[in-house]
Image: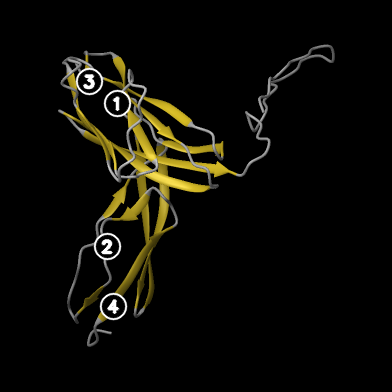
Amino acid sequence: VDSEELQLFAISSDNSQFHPAMFKPQVLQPGGRTTIQIIYLPRVVGSVDASLTISTSAGDLAYEIHAEAVANPYRLHPFVGTKIPAGVTYSRPIIMYNPTDELLHVREVFTTESFLHLHLPDSDDALGDAPEATLSSPTSSEGMWQIPARSEKEIIHLMFRASQPGKFSGYVHVKTDRENMVLPVELHVLRGGLHPTPKDFDFGILTSSDEQRVVPISL
């Protein structure tokens, strides 16, 4: 109603790739307006549709979103959808490609999630026991975070370990002298027991009854 104030309670999305930035409940006076910033952090290449719901004192307002994601030119990718048993260490290298004709400098890599640990490729000690784990461009190893033109290099190692089952979500931030990037991390820790790898099996197409094909499975 034009003569009444409007209370904005919350904003939700049906797609985890979209979320509001620093939204706080607020009140709009009659005739007032506000701007809500939505962050799109794609996890897959291609088109995506989502619906935002704005909860207000006048009811819920739906807002449809369409976006298109392209491949990362630095060949960085999110670490999502991984399932690991409780107590098992998850370790993955973060490898970065330099798509330019000039030397690329990585300035800083950090995460604000205490359950994620970062360490240099040649280091045996994982960092991240503090609430914020940060690795700045090393001065003791000249060239470690310098990526030559049209080549790739492992810049950091991501590690994770949890003793309790559940879903763990966070981000790894990569800052360079050209662009800054954010890598989503979403890990599902399973309860103890036997867990097969892979989960699904593809035997392809067998063209005769005598043909055999073996797919290995790890427990």
Kind of residue sitting beneath label 3: Trp
Q: CA distance from mark 4 to mark 1?
A: 42 Å
Residue 145 - label: 3
Q: Secondary structure at mark 3?
A: loop
Q: CA distance from mark 2 to mark 4?
A: 13 Å
Q: CA distance from mark 3 to mark 4?
A: 48 Å
Q: Secondary structure at mark 2?
A: loop
Quarter of the image holding residue 105?
top left
Q: Write the residue at 68% across / 24% down.
A: 217
Q: Write the residue at 28% across / 71% down.
A: 25
In this view, the mark in front (3 or 2): 3
In this view, the mark in front (1 or 2): 2
Q: Position of residue 192 (x, y in %)?
A: 63, 41
Q: Secondary structure at mark 1?
A: loop
Residue 23 - label: 2
Marked residue nearer the N-terminal end (3 or 2): 2
Residue most extreme to the right? 209
For this view, does 211 lie left or right of residue 106? right
Kind of residue sitting beneath label 2: Phe
Marked residue nearer the N-terminal end (4 or 1): 4
Residue 73 - label: 1
The N terminus, quarter of image:
bottom left
In this view, the mark in front (3 or 1): 3
Q: CA distance from mark 3 to mark 1?
A: 18 Å
Marked residue nearer the N-terminal end (1 or 2): 2
Q: CA distance from mark 3 to mark 2?
A: 35 Å
Residue 61 - label: none
Query: Of 126 and 94, which appears nearest the observer?
Result: 126
